[in-house]
Amino acid sequence: MYPRPFDYVRADSVEQALDLRSETGGRFIAGGHSLLPMMKIRMTAPNALVDIGRIDGLKGIAADNGGFTIGALTTHSMVAAEGAEGFPAALSEAASMIGDPLVRNRGTVGGNVAHADPASDLPTVFSALGATMTAASKGGATRDIGAPEFFTGLFESALNSDELLTTVKVDAERAGRASAYAKLFNPASRYAVVGACAVVEIGEDGSCAACTVAVGGLTPKATVLESVANALTGNPVTEDSAESAARESIDEVGDDIMGDVYAGVDYRRQMLPVFVARAINAAASRAG
Amino acid sequence: MSRYMGTAVKRVEDPRFLQGQGKYVANLSLPGMAYVAVKRSPLAHAKILGIDSSEAEALDGVIAVYTGQDLLDGGASFACGSLPCGFTPPDIVTPAHNPVAVDKVRHVGDAIAVVVAESSYIAEDALDLIDVDLDPLPVVVDARAALEDDAPLVHDDVGTNLSFHWPLGDEDAVNEALSDSDHVVELEFVNQRLIANAMEPRACAAEWDPSSESMTVWTTSQNPHTIRLLLGAFTLGIPEHKLRVISPDVGGGFGSKIFHYPEEVIVPWVARAIGRPAKWVASRTESYVTDAQGRDHITRAKIGVNDDGTITGLHVTTWANLGAYLSTFAPLIPTALYITLLSGVYKIPVIFGESYGAFTNTVPVDAYRGAGRPEASYLLETMVDLAARRLDMDPVELRRKNLIPSDEFPYQTPVALEYDSGNYQGLFDKIEELSEYQSLRQEQEKARAEGRLVGIGFSSCIEASGPAPSAVAVGLGAAIGLFESGSIRVHPTGKISVFTGSHSHGQGHETTFAQIVADELGVAMEDVEIVHGDTDRIPYGVGTYGSRSAAIGGSALVKSAEKIRDKLKKIAAHMLEASVEDMVYDQDEGTISVSGSPESAKTFAELAFAVTTADNLPEGMEPGLEETSFYDPANFTFPASAHTAMVEIDSKTGEVEVQSYAAVDDVGNVINPMIVEGQILGGIVQGVGQALWEHGIYGEDGQLLSGSMLSYAMPRADGFPSIAIDRIETPSPHNPLGVKGAGEMGTIAATATISSAVLDALAPLGVTHLNMPLTAEKIHNAIVAAGNGGGE
């Protein structure tokens, strides 16, 4: 378990990190919980690591303008423990389900999102929440990329190689609108076999005024399911209506399902609506 | 009368482990040390057409690259021999096992070449530069398939994949009993492959001293003397008196560190070849494909039962997967530690069992916590549950009907073993009380009425622990006797060093053995140090496995303490001018006095010093106070257990939640209840791991598909409720401590208990059996197949 040789440099600012990255052609490292294991089994061998872990100002969660800005270096533990009014429940819930306490104490939101692991939890939640990722590039330029567009494929994101993800912004929850995340764990890796996130807004008449549902774990990237939202919107949210809307997910995801030795494609397909319905019910009950 | 025995003394070894001060092989650093890495086969079965190591050798910092042929030839080092098998029943086929493959590789992870370098990093880089030309051969991974006529041969030279066929019992009598039975229940099932995953990966270091032509080997072994014997007599041919094997702190073994491994040959070979100390430390990835694995049986079983619930007979045929090579004790596990356990806690008039041991293109299989006995218990308890279901009888009631009565011990089973003692009715009474069995059943009835899948599992298991009387072991095919040694050295100031052949790698011997000796001699525990794991310091010993340390290693210490006490009594009698018969050894106080006159008492320290001044000893007595004993047990000990669990299955996903778990174990007398409870708890968790999660999955091509922590699911704390543990104590009548094995019982019972609970939960759907691990997908599919539509 020894990586190939690599250089190590540490950046003190975003600007310096971007410079070092272009000088070395290496990769950014924050918590290292995805990158280092891959390097140790020699699946990947960057020639240099640019350590962004100690850059000031990229760690922490700030409330502003009806939303929250999450610094890229914020750990999963911090997200799981965030208790501010209106902080999306699904996000804390998902963060608390990542790995184990050791992983959550080191792993970062930015690293997780940039890695774009299809079995990861946060991409699903950010996609459902319609989060905005901000990427910095040299010269102080920044670019906003919305989720789910940020997640472009298996371990692929919309980030360019000369960009550094600095923050993720999400809207605050408000009365009548809430989120939830439901997950079937792989008992070995703790990654999602199926992960579903629902954001549900309940109107004054008690029916679903708006809804977004995203799934991950079984698909190559976090996927927003329009058909489920359409089926639910305008209807009262009950166990039956949630289940019926959730069933739409099977057709929408179609053949885009990955299996493994723990859970095959057919099983995951059957679990998809189960967890979508669970997420919808939990979100609706929080919103209602 | 005893001050330490039976009390929950805190583990004296824990402060150093908790503070990161343990000394493991991987921590060892010797001047001039070189680092060894092993090039391993990516294929399960292939001819080695060529190995080009020129690029690797040219890499800066690489000292040498060796092939299997280099090791056989010897060169500047030893000519290596084949890794031997330590248990060879009659007619066994034992193909060669070269430490590094020569003509072909036989499993993924088989060693192909050895790199020696100035650092582990360079060694790893060099591995990537070795070009191996492999010609793939057909692969067989399944034990039964390996015995078919057209199966690829794992060892061409022996002409068969069958290593042994081991039958025991009267097959005709069993067939007759079954045909006379009211019912015969038959089942074919798999006991899946497991991977031990000790917390510390294996490691080995070695240093050759040319001036004395002696070798020191540090290795992560449960039994350093066994490794020394095999290195000396078979693999390296170093004279035993020139060979020192040290197993320092070892981070768990679960059986996987009993065996003599190729790296224990490679590293000392390298140390002599290059004239420098050398070290190898396994990565977790290597552990997955080189540590001996566990279980992997295919079994067909038939049990006969009459309408009243009486078991009439049992017929068992098992195909045991041995992997690609015979690991050190591999043939012992599916034979003498398995078939002989098939009577369990029950009176079964006739039993026949047979095992076929087969070579396959998989990692070798050997002892893993429980080793044969969990396989036997799972089999028997599964069959008993099925019989109860056939008769529509409560499974506990059926078990109770067939228990061996407490007044029938020693009890001779039809499968060779004679149980020493037991109180199975007492176990059942206690577990029904502890688990509140009757109210669990009522709860279950209510839950079922609501359509919930709730199951209650029960198992009652036996273990033959503490192997073994040497005559029995060698009679069955063991290469060595299975006694144990124990030395007590009393220093002039009365402080004590204890040297035991047992090895502690998590068991807590530094605490429990000190408790034993302190009580036997009436001294403070703090004055007793336990030394183990170094063949130059301890007398020849056998080591730790099969839950043998307390019963055999502990008993050897009791015998040595007796000798010490006898000698001190003679000295005290001489000093006090009284007769030895009148001397009283007060084990509470550590004093010896003349009977009736306590004021005459001499303290242990006074007497120890008198032995050292040696100016006033009884006529003919030698100075010094050091005694050694070798204890050969009269029999195995037979701990027993009864466990229950309640599980609920999520009918939509198939996920299992263990809601409650209760265990009553009888491990005889208890030295340290906290340590015993820890052993039972850890064992239960490991046993549940097999039932629900763990599975070494091989693809048809022989690739290990669950070869990392990402895909091989180990148990986690959050998968468990609080576990209720209690015990009864039926002392073993044949060892001086009255103890029985405690290290494996939990594992043996838990697997069967959880499987029983899950199958009970699914029983209303008509599901009769599912193979382990009972994963969510497997259960979900069974629910769907049963037509109950839980999965949308």
Image: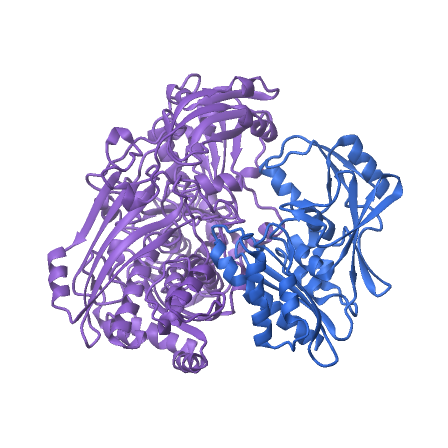
Chain colours: A blue, B purple
| Nearest to the observer: residue B772 or residue B626 | B772
| Quadrant of residue B448 within the rendered picture | bottom left
The image quadrant where one finds the N terminus of chain B is bottom left
Q: Position of residue B666 (x, y in %)?
A: 36, 66
| Nearest to the observer: residue B20 or residue A103 | A103
Q: Is residue B456 above or below residue B524?
A: below
Q: Which residue lies furthest to the right in this view?
A: A139
| Quadrant of residue B752 within the rendered picture | bottom left
| Nearest to the observer: residue B509 or residue A26 | A26
Is residue B711 at least partly visible in the picture? yes
The number of callouts visible is 0
Q: Position of residue B197 (x, y in %)?
A: 48, 48
Q: In this view, does B157 lie above or below B496?
A: above
| Nearest to the observer: residue B530 or residue B588 | B530
Is residue B457 at least partly visible in the picture? no
* Position of residue B559 in the picture relative to residue B125 (left or right): left
Q: Where is residue B515 in the image (x, y as percent from the top left)?
A: 47, 58
Q: In this view, does B28 lie above or below B608?
A: above
| Quadrant of residue A123 within the rendered picture | bottom right
Q: Position of residue B486 (x, y in %)?
A: 39, 47
Residue at point 75%, 38% (across, down): A161
* Position of residue B34 in the picture relative to residue A81 (left or right): left
